[in-house]
Amino acid sequence: MAKAFFGGVHPHDMKAATNEKAIEQLAPPKQVVIPMSQHFGAPCTPTVQKGDHVKIGQKIGEFKGLGAPIHASVSGTVVAVEPRPYSMGGNVMSVVIDNDFQDEISEEV
C-alpha cells in the first residue's frame, strides 16, 4: 500500500517586495580585488606587477602543488599587489585591478 504525506510546512515565499519590479543591470565595478587564495589548496603566487595591463581571462596567479590558477575578471591596470582583508579572516596576497571598461579578452581564452 502506497503511503502519502499530506500537509507539511509551507513558508511564505517573501517575494511580494520584488516580484513586480523590473530586472536591473548592475554597473561594472571600477576596481576589483582578487585574492590569491580561493580554495583549500596553497595560495597562488601573483604573476603580474603594479603597472601591468591585464585582460579578461589572463592568468594573474600561478599555483604550486595542489591548486588552480587565478585569472583576471576585468581588463585594466594592476594598481597594487599587496595583502588585503580576506573573507576567511586575516589578510591574503591580492591583485588590485582598476577596470578600464574596455572588456578586452586575453589571447589565452
Image: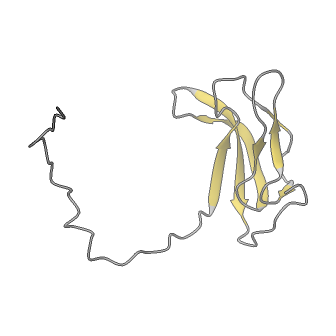
Q: Quadrant of residue 90?
A: top right
3 vs 43, left or right, is left
Q: Tell me the quarter of the image containing the N terminus.
A: top left
Q: Quadrant of residue 75?
A: bottom right
Image: 93 above or below 98: above
Identify the coloring: secondary structure
Q: Name the foreground residue: 32 vs 103.
A: 103
37 vs 17, left or right, is right
Q: Tell me the quarter of the image containing the C terminus.
A: bottom right
**Which residue occupies the extreme left position in the image?**
7
Percent across and percent down for residue 65 are 82, 21
Total count of labels: 0
Name the residue at 64% across, 47% down: 33
Image: 26 above or below 61: below
Name the residue at 81% across, 44% down: 60
**Which residue occupies the extreme front position in the image?**
1
Q: Name the foreground residue: 40 vs 81.
A: 40
Percent across and percent down for residue 31 are 64, 58
Name the residue at 86% across, 53% down: 52
31 vs 8, left or right, is right
Q: Name the foreground residue: 64 vs 91.
A: 64
Name the residue at 14% across, 48% down: 10
Image: 96 above or below 30: above
Percent across and percent down for residue 18 are 27, 69
Q: Name the foreground residue: 58 vs 14.
A: 14
Percent across and percent down for residue 66 are 77, 22
